[in-house]
């Protein structure tokens, strides 16, 4: 069964009935930068989210987790420039206050509004500026792209996508945006992600599908091993496409599932590619692991190794660092049976240097995307992880962030 | 009870009956660099070692683990420039061959000789060069300092120490050397360390004491989160000081134990201070954790955060990154009760920004050693970890290592 997924413009406002708007509220020191954004549906949505597992969760994460227990939502307000984390009772009050301002503006129940914040930790939100900002925001059906830009922090470019496809013979759309460039070691996802669809979905099915898709995408990227306090990924489904609600028994369920996984993997790869200071995307495929959990450990260990990330930056096919990362990963491994390839060049055979051409190996490291393939020859477990190289740019970006 | 520990010269050859020697064997591309070294005792020693837990352990690690089952050894040969890792059967053969060359030279049983290698992974040892080199090495009682230099890879300076103290009214000496600057996330210790003493020790007691001292020193340092394939720490005790063998019932056992912990902590701190590209040593004290395991998680998480390592490099008291690292560490944490200080400046109180002077906080970041103190206010667990900052130097060191 092959489906047609058309890539279309508009990202989160591509699905019917979603609008977004942004403003420069002055939270960021450069007052001209768009730093406050609202995304809303015209009608109530079923909604589900996954969040950071950090013990120092930011106030807006706590608010989202509380409100999403209902499985319903209709809008989210997001600011960049301030994470509203490590801000205590005042921070929690301000997070609720943000949602109330939006509820008032859009005439919704407070409980139907969510909030997110991203930026510096440990400073109170300038709630007066946010109040003025909310008043200024105009929501439009083509506001998705501006929304993707307003939630950026150190991102060099917005990450956004929308797909159009058919369910029950009806046109359905799924849109997504993410931000995230540093502090990327999701578990869940060290990042902000908002997804919208006009498909009608059964809540329990949507929840399971989103969990699976996040596990295989956002939870498989890493830039620096730092897990954020504010990770958030929320899917809003407003049902305006008028299909029979999707669940596991619906014949078109695999179509939506496929679309969701495509969107999340696209956004995950875009985040890895835009890691702070990154010049190269690395994709690590692990096959032959004892099981999937081991494959995940192995694949992520390679993306997380600063030494290998440096080798990647230098275009140096120093596969010993991949071997070291695999050995330290905790996955089952037979020293005499694993193979490693960089691009098409097999550099390691049965745990030792393969006969390979150095120039070809260097050439395989010279692309914008470098693909590492590891076969552990122990079982059927497989996984793919994404990461980036480690460069001066990362250091520069992070040495003086608060100034 | 207060003991006198005199710091003396000679490191591993300071204790009676130990000799060391080195040569430039040509393993390293610059043939003038000392890259092969032997350390030996005039008489058999009891010996114990701790090693990397990696699944891609290097051949010499396998040899040491096998031979140390006897609890006895008399010599070790070490090369730098080549890790003899991911080298299969040939690598294992070469590792045994290294020990046989030394056994022949010193007229010892093969089983009494250990070996270590450090350097690039995935290349076979030039065993012919090693054979010639072993022939050239002259062992002397003042060879310890040269030994410390010959085992270096990217280290900028040797790390060595010796202490002299009294047991049973007899003068006892304990010496130690380490190498290690990258791939430092010991578990155990991502590094090479050799310790010698002329104290007589009971084997079981020595084993337990070394395990404890390694856990509190080498296993509490990290530079980059990468665990090595070659980590090795071996203690040789030849008993020539003629004290009653030390065990838990010996009244002077605490004196040796104290000396051992001082030596290992000194060497651990020196390794952290000399991390690749490091300009600053960071010491992280965690108090008030639910238990020691939690304190270790919390302290190590701070030293391991690349974002905080970058802030340290920039002298930026961006404590939110410490909070994020603590939150992600997996330790029990109450968001409303933890405190963080940088040097003498309390920057976080009850999980929020404390009232503090920015200039004072920046000043506390400006020293060669920056001390972070975290109080979780949950229990009695405490731990100390050491790390360093993350700079352009680390990137430069690691982008083109194999060329």
Image: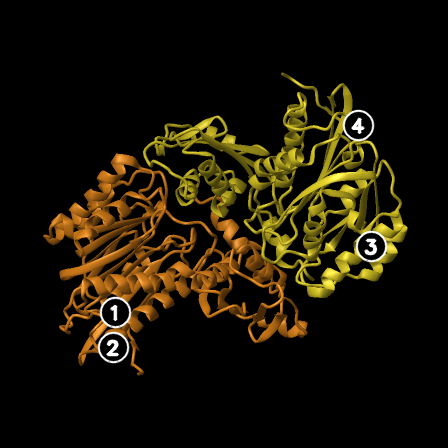
Chain colours: A yellow, B orange
Closer to the camera: disc 4 or disc 2?
Answer: 4
| Separation of marks 4 and 2 at Cα, in angstroms | 82 Å
Residue B248 in picture, x, y percent from top left: 23, 71
Within 10 angstroms of label 2, few (less than 14), some, or many (20 or more) residues?
A: some
Distance from label 1 to label 4 (Cα)? 77 Å
Q: Position of residue B140 (x, y in %)?
A: 19, 63
What is the distance, in whole Å, between disc 2 and disc 1 at their CAs?
9 Å
Residue hosting label 4: A241
Local SS, label 1: strand
Figure quadrant of residue A282: top right
Q: Which residue is mark 1?
A: B174
Which chain letter goes with mark 1?
Answer: B
Q: Residue at x 45, y 27 (%)?
A: A345
Q: Nearer the viewer, residue B118 or A42?
A: A42
* Residue designated by label 3: A100
Q: Residue at x 19, y 62 (%)?
A: B203
Mark number for residue A173? none
* Location of residue B296 (image quadrant): bottom left
Q: Secondary structure at mark 3?
A: helix
Say which label, 2 or 1, has the lower sequence index. 2
Q: Residues within 10 Å of mark 4 (few under 14, many from 20)?
A: many
> Is B340 displayed left or right of B21 in the figure?
right
Spatial separation of the CA atoms under disc 1 and disc 3: 68 Å
Horizontal and vertical percent for residue A165? 73, 23
What residue would you read off at disc 2? B165
């Amino acid at each position: 069964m092959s489906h047609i997924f058309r890539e279309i413009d508009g990202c989160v406002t591509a699905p019917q009935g979603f609008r977004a708007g942004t403003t420069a509220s002055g939270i960021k020191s450069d007052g001209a930068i768009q730093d406050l954004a609202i995304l809303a549906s015209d009608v109530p949505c079923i909604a589900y989210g996954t969040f950071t597992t950090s013990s120092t969760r930011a106030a807006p994460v706590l608010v989202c987790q509380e409100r999403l227990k209902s499985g319903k939502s209709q809008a989210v307000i997001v600011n960049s420039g301030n994470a509203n984390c490590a801000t205590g009772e005042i921070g929690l009050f301000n997070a609720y206050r943000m949602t109330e301002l939006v509820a008032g503006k859009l005439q919704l129940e407070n409980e139907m509004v969510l909030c997110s914040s991203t930026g510096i930790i440990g400073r109170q939100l300038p709630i007066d500026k946010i109040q003025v900002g909310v008043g200024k925001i105009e929501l439009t059906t083509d506001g998705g792209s501006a929304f993707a830009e307003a939630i950026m922090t150190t991102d060099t470019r917005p990450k956004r996508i929308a797909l159009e496809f058919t369910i029950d013979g009806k046109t359905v759309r799924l849109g997504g945006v993410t931000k995230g460039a540093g502090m990327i070691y999701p578990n869940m996802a060290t990042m902000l992600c908002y997804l919208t669809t006009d498909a009608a979905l059964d809540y329990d099915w949507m929840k399971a599908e989103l969990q699976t898709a996040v596990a295989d995408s956002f939870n498989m990227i890493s830039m620096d091993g730092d897990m954020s306090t504010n990770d958030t990924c929320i899917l809003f489904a407003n049902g305006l496409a008028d299909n029979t609600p999707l669940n596991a028994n619906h014949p078109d369920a695999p179509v939506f599932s496929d679309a969701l996984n495509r969107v999340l993997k696209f956004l995950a790869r875009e985040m890895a590619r835009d890691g702070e200071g990154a010049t190269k995307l690395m994709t690590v495929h692990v096959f032959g692991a004892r099981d999937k959990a081991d494959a995940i450990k192995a694949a992520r260990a390679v993306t997380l190794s600063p030494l290998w990330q440096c080798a990647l930056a230098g275009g140096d096919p120093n596969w010993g660092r991949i071997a070291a990362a695999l050995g330290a990963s905790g996955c089952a491994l037979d020293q005499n049976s694993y193979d490693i390839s960089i691009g098409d060049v097999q550099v390691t055979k049965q745990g030792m240097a393969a006969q390979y051409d150095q120039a070809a190996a260097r050439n395989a490291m010279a692309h914008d995307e470098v693909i590492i393939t590891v076969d552990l020859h122990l079982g059927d477990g497989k996984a793919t992880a994404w990461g980036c190289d480690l460069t001066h740019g990362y250091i520069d970006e992070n040495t003086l962030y608060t100034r």
